[in-house]
Image (cartoon, rainbow, N blue to C red):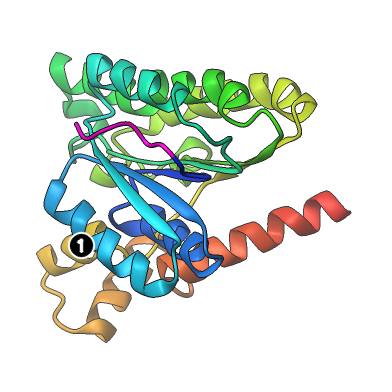
Amino acid sequence: MSEPPSDIDSLVLGGARGIGFAQARRLAKEGRSIGLVGRNPARLDHARRRLLRYGARSVEINVADLAEPRQRAALLDRLKANSKPLVSLFVGGPGPRAGRIDEIDAQDEKRAREVCVSYPADMLAIAPSLMPFGGRLYLLSSSASIEPIEGHHFYLSARYRRELDKLAERHLASLSACSIDLIVLRPRVVLTQMSLAYACSRGARGPAAVRTVLKDRFDVASVPSAESYLRRAISEHEAGRAG
């Protein structure tokens, strides 16, 4: 793991790609100092270079597997040493191994619980100390928590995502009291590397075919990019608060 973040104001856990990277790109365009955390050093470095081109003031990377309790604890210690309060915290990161809910073994179940419950729970608990002056906390869940697709490998984590939603509800009042705005993201399907790989495994070749496979499988009218999904989700959250 690299040296602790020293001067970041925004942290993206699982920010090397997908919705996490879309959030990091939004922050970069605002000129933020960003901390990225993920498992793959090469992907993190590639993301860092892209974010600097998008306008980030600085980008610091930390290599850690957030599903591993010891690595997660070490990361939390590093975050506590950060010299600047965070104004934005995105809790994304690894997912469980792809597979049917009824086919998981004990090891799969242990990792799924760490990824979907224990790790987000740790971040929800520490958020007030990382964001003493308030800010925005983004929690990446899944539409599987409210509308699972029976037996589908994308939704191995469905049972744990429901626990995560309940956990978020329990923290909502305490976070609000600290001026932390909690935004729970529950995408159904988004055009990311994971969904692209799934569509290609079903024989899709080319952008149009990929979108057709995903629209048919998830019964949706369109498949948004990570950036457009995030933009819409934040806009809907803000409209709900204003209402």
Relative image position of residue 75 (x, y in whole percent): 33, 25
Report which quarter residue 102 is drawn in.
top left
Residue 242 painted magenta:
no
Quarter of the image with the C terminus in it: bottom right
Horizontal side, residue 195 vs residue 78: left or right: left
175 w.r.t. 240: above or below: above
Question: 221 or 224, which is in the foreground?
Answer: 224
Q: Residue at x 63, y 58 (%)?
A: 234
Residue located at (71% from left, 33% from top): 133
Q: Which residues are magenta?
A: 1-6
Q: Give the farthest residue toward the right.
A: 243
Q: Nearer the viewer, residue 39 or 166?
A: 39
Residue at the (48%, 20%) spot, across then down: 121
Which residue position holds label 1?
Answer: 46
Assign the magenta stretch its main secondary structure. loop
Assess whether residue 3 is covered by the magenta stretch.
yes
Q: Looking at the rendering, which quadrant does residue 225 occupy?
A: bottom left
Quadrant where the image shows the N terminus: top left
Q: Amino acid at mark 1?
A: His
In this rendering, the answer to whether 10 lies above or below 91 is below
In this picture, is 107 found above or below 223? Answer: above
Residue 163, x across and y down, in percent: 49, 22
- Left or right of 115? Residue 205 is left
Q: Please provide percent x and percent y for residue 18.
A: 33, 58
